[in-house]
Image (cartoon, rainbow, N blue to C red):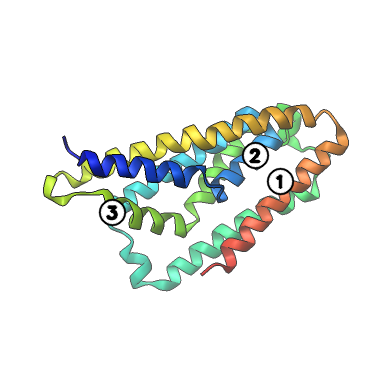
Amino acid sequence: MPIDPHLLALFTVTTIVAMITPGPDMLFVLGCGMRGGPRAGLLATAGVASSEAVHVAVAAAGLAALFEAVPVAFTIVRIAGAAYLIYLGVQILRNRGNGDLDAAATGGGISGRRAFLSGLMTNLLNPKMVTFTIAFLPQFIDPALGQVWLQFTILGAILIALEFLVDGTVGVLAGRIGGWLRTRHAARRRIDTATGGIFVGLGVKLAVDS
């Protein structure tokens, strides 16, 4: 077996615990599902999971040294990600209750394409996710077994699968609840206000966290 079974079991349990704890990814997917429906929630999860695949590749390549060697790179990427989240939140707040071009096309407040791209960009522009992955995955790698790249691949695949399972479920359920609420104008405004507030809050938190 290319990976230690005990480390694999420990990794799986630890990852599940981390996934079910509400965090930025889950809140983002929740907001997309509430505003755009189950499909948007699921595609937001796909965007986040796609970025996780990139993070795993970065971890395997050992590029964490970039943030250590050039600290300003971490700051630049962090601020860019924060600004993007805040921009999304402000746009939602400005158009709350009114819908937009995406809404006209899909019947929801955010299209599946936009949900996917937003999930992808938001997570890609979060250097903390990169550094977390780089710090987290190697703890469950046993160099003595060889084929370190394959061990990274297996762990990364499990991480992405659990991302889909947990956050995807949250996105779909939020979409079903949001779909019912969106038929009521007052509730729609509250959904948009809450979603915009979540995005702006996440952006501010990302910007001020060191």
- For the residues bearing labels 1 and 3, Cβ distance under 8 angstroms: no
The CA distance from mark 1 to mark 3 is 35 Å
Is residue 128 placed above or below 188 in the rendered structure? below
Between marks 1 and 3 in the image, the one whose residue lies nearer the viewer: 3
Reading the image, the residue beneath label 3 is: 139
Reading the image, the residue beneath label 1 is: 195
Within-10-Å neighbours for mark 3: few <14, some 14–19, many 20+: few
Query: Which of the two discs, 2 and 3, labels the residue nearer the N terminus?
Result: 2
| Occupied quadrant, residue 87 | bottom right
Within-10-Å neighbours for mark 1: few <14, some 14–19, many 20+: many
Residue at 74%, 33% in the rendered image? 103
Query: Which of the two discs, 1 and 3, labels the residue nearer the N terminus?
Result: 3
- For the residues bearing labels 2 and 1, Cβ distance under 8 angstroms: yes
Observer-nearest of 123 and 139: 139
Query: Which of the two discs, 2 and 1, labels the residue nearer the N terminus?
Result: 2
Q: Say which mark, if any, is on residue 32.
A: 2
Q: Say which mark, if any, is on residue 152.
A: none
- For residue 156, side relative to residue 142 (left or right): right
Residue at 55%, 33% in the rendered image? 43
- For residue 170, side relative to residue 64 (left or right): right
Instruction: Determine the residue located farthest toward the right in the rendered image.
Output: 186
Within-10-Å neighbours for mark 2: few <14, some 14–19, many 20+: many
Is residue 1 shown to the viewer in this render? Answer: yes
| Occupied quadrant, residue 172 | top right
| Occupied quadrant, residue 117 | top right
Is residue 110 shown to the viewer in this render? Answer: no
The CA distance from mark 2 to mark 1 is 8 Å
Q: Where is residue 50 in the image (x, y as percent from the top left)?
A: 44, 40
Helix, strand or loop at label 1? It is: helix
